[in-house]
Amino acid sequence: MSVNPIKLSRQKVKDTLVREGLKTGDILLVHSSLRSVGPISGGADALIDGLLDTVGSDGILAMPAFNYTRPLPTPYFDTMATPSRAGALTEVYRKRSQSIRSLHPTHSVIAQGKRAVEFLSGHEKCLAFGVGSPLDRLAQAGGWVLLLGVTQTANSCIHVGESHAGVRKFHWQDGPSPVAKLLTPDGRIVEHPIDCSSSCSAAFNYLEYPLRRKGMLVDLNLGDATCLLMRGKDVIATVIEVVQERADALLCRSETCRPCLLARKYISENLYGAVR
C-alpha cells in the first residue's frame, strides 16, 4: 500500500512565500482548503506556524472565521465559543490562545500580530465586507491575499470591492432583514442586524482573467495545493473597474439565487436596459 509523501513543512511554507515576495512585517489574509494541501509535517499547526513565521510578529496573519447567516448562531454569537465554518485550518487558528477575533456575528475575522486589534476592532459597527471593515483595512494597508487551494469564489476581498463600487446587494430571504444575537465583551447579549454584503460569490472566478491580464496574480504551490497570491488593493480596484464596465459581471446565473436575480432586476430597471 503506497503512502503519499510529505511535501510540505513549516520551513517550506516560509521559504515558498518569501521567494514569492512576502517579508517580515507584511499583512497576509489566507482563505484555505486544508484538505487540498495533502500531508504536512506537523499537520495544520505547522502550516499556520509557517505562515506566521513569514510575516513575523510585526506582521499580521488573518483568516476568516465565518459561521455564516444560514443558520444564524444560536443561542448567540460568542467570539470565544462559536466555531468557524470557513475551513478546518481557520478553526485550528481560532482556537489558538493568541488569536484575536473580530466582533461580528456571521463573518468575523481572526488574526495574530501586534496591530491585530487595530485592524479587527469595531467590526460590529460596519457591514461584514463594507468600506472600513477589517478586510478593507487589511487590504488598504497593503495586505496580501493568499488563496490556498481555493478559487476566487472564496476571495472575500471581492465582496469588499463590491462595497467600494456601490453594488446593490440583496438578502437570500424575503421579508425583514435577519437579526443575530451577539455576546459583547462586557457580557451583554445584543441584537445585530445582518447586512447582505456577503450575498453570492458563485461568479467571482470572472475576476481571474482581468487580474491575470494585469499581472496581479502570483501562482505557487504549497504541498499539493494550487495557490494564488495577490494584493487586496488590486482586487478591490479591479472589482470597481469590472463593475463599471459590466454591472452584472459578478452575478451568478442560477435561477434559485435570490440575491443575484434581484440584483439583475435592479440593474435592468436602473441602468436603462444596459444589462440584458
Image (cartoon, rainbow, N blue to C red):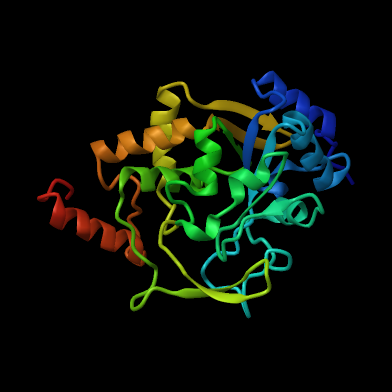
Residue 9 appears in the figure? no
- In the image, taking residue 94 as reference, residue 234 lies left or right, namely left
- Return the residue nearer the eye: 172 or 132: 132
Q: What residue is at 32 percent from the left and 43 percent from the top? A: 165
**Extreme front residue here?**
186
- Counting from the top left corner in percent of width and height, residue 122 is at 55, 55
Q: Is residue 219 above or below residue 184?
A: above
- In the image, taking residue 105 as reference, residue 49 lies left or right, namely right
Q: What residue is at 44 percent from the left and 42 percent from the top? A: 205
- Counting from the top left corner in percent of width and height, residue 186 is at 67, 69
- In the image, taking residue 178 as reference, residue 256 lies left or right, namely left
- Counting from the top left corner in percent of width and height, residue 63 is at 64, 47
Tell me where residue 210 sits by quadrant: top left
- Return the residue nearer the eye: 249 or 232: 232
Q: Is residue 29 above or below residue 196?
A: above
Q: What residue is at 37 percent from the left and 48 percent from the top? A: 163
Q: What residue is at 83 percent from the left and 46 percent from the top? A: 45
Tell me where residue 108 sits by quadrant: bottom right
Residue 84 appears in the figure? yes
Q: Is residue 183 above or below residue 110?
A: below
- Return the residue nearer the eye: 240 or 5: 240
- Counting from the top left corner in percent of width and height, residue 21 is at 64, 20
